[in-house]
Amino acid sequence: MMTAPIGVAVIGAGMAGRAHCAGYRTAPTLFDPPLPPIHYAAVIDANPSVAADAATRYGYERSGSDWRTLLDAPDVQVVSVVVANTLHREIVEALLDAGRHVLCEKPLADTLTNARAMSDAAAAHPELVTGTAFVYRRQPAVAALRELVRDEFGEVSHFNGSYWCDYALSPATPMAWRYKGAPGTGALADIGSHLIDLAEFVCGPMTAVGGAAFTTKITKRFVPLGTTYGHAAAELSDVAEPVENDDVATFTAHFASGAVGTFSVSRVAPGHANSLAFDVMAQHGGAKWNMDRPAEFSVARKSRGDGFDGYNQVLVGPAHPYLKGGVPMDFPGVSYGVGDLFGFQARAFLEQVAGIEGGLPPVATFADGVRDLTIIDAVTRSAGAGGAVVELAAQPDAAIPITN
Ligand SMILES: NC(=O)c1ccc[n+]([C@@H]2O[C@H](COP(=O)([O-])OP(=O)(O)OC[C@H]3O[C@@H](n4cnc5c(N)ncnc54)[C@H](O)[C@@H]3O)[C@@H](O)[C@H]2O)c1
């Protein structure tokens, strides 16, 4: 096990970049055994004031605007890449060539081709730890339900999932990188990537998708006058640019287990700020979870026929994954939020880098990121062919084993 300090840097200090900065800060406070000392080296953002602000807030030694400065920085071993998807490949490949461990945001890349190239680059560096930041696998409720489905539910018949957001509902939301790119790179890749990953995480690999349909409701957006990040409002110029990708995406799927799936994803869903939700229906039970109320889920267990069958509400607590040792007061009824998940993820990645065994489940791999984009690509081809069924490779790039 490594005991030398691990130097950490984050590239991109926008919406998710700050969550990575904070996650590495929290990581050493969570779980056992202790991590090696963490050196908070640098925050990089194309906008120097954004980088400087994040570095100051989260206690990183320095900030800068050029990620290439990290390539020969002797105090940086671990880097999170948290910028627009079109930038992932160039940055990740350069970091791997420079011998850095890389945690890259989802979707792994803007295209399946680029994701595959990144996965090949990672495979060429087996000495380096790489990961795709599917942070919602670390929702305690989701991890608990996965175990229940595996251990108790028997054959799954139906997974019904949705990820509905309203961040693009207003025509005044400024033009940003999220609205550029081919069909499938919109809501489907931005938020559907999480839902697709969770569907396979809970129910095992899909074998085909079909019935896909996309629509774009707001077809142009105004370029902001100044800097903006995340989904923040901004003062707008009078220059409008076309929205190139999907606001809404729907599709169906078949799983190798024989289950079927129904999916819908939207970034223009009124009243849904960040509603990731799914139902799993199986031979011996059913389960429901909705991120609107992340620390609770509902379970219908095997029928007893005694008049009390139905869904029971379960509050997440230290009996479920991640909570014991994962929050400062790991007591039943003391809840958690999305920010905590970034701490769990950072801790898992640092454990992998430090060679700590038996700790948290490892971070999803680049192969998992390729797998996700394989399904996104298949859904996009289905939508382009009027909903045709598109088979997925019999040997997926990364079959998520349901058995561990
Ligand atoms: N896991 C999650 O829950 C989650 C949530 C949001 C975003 N994301 C992912 O994180 C990534 C970033 O998304 P975001 O919403 O934080 O974007 P954002 O627009 O809020 O932030 C991106 C930042 O990158 C900076 N930037 C642009 N070009 C750069 C460059 N060449 N070098 C360094 N910095 C540069 C911008 O100035 C901006 O501050 C995307 O891949 C997105 O899909 C993941």
Image (cartoon, rainbow, N blue to C red):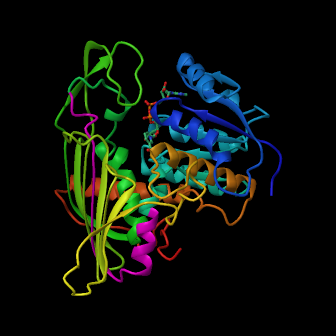
- Residue 378, percent across and down? 32, 59
Q: Is residue 165 above or below residue 64?
A: below
- The foreground one among 214 and 97 is 214
Extreme residue toward the right, this view: 4
Viewed as shown, does residue 216 lie left or right of 278? left
- The foreground one among 236 and 34 is 34
Count of labels in the image: 0
Which quadrant of the structure image shows residue 277? bottom left
Viewed as shown, does residue 213 lie left or right of 123? left
- Residue 78, percent across and down? 68, 42
Q: Is residue 161 above or below residue 343?
A: below
Which quadrant of the structure image shows residue 230? top left
- The foreground one among 348 and 101 is 348
Q: Quick check: is 37 in the magenta stretch?
A: no
Q: Quick check: is 153 in the magenta stretch?
A: yes
Q: Is residue 365 above or below residue 177?
A: below
- The residue under the point 64% across, 23% down is 63
| One can see residue 259 in this view | no
Q: Which residues are magenta?
A: 143-170
- The residue under the point 20% across, 26% down is 171
Q: Quadrant of the N terminus?
A: bottom right
- The residue under the point 46% across, 64% down is 143
Which quadrant of the structure image shows residue 38? top right
- The foreground one among 354 and 320 is 320
- Residue 15, percent across and down? 45, 32
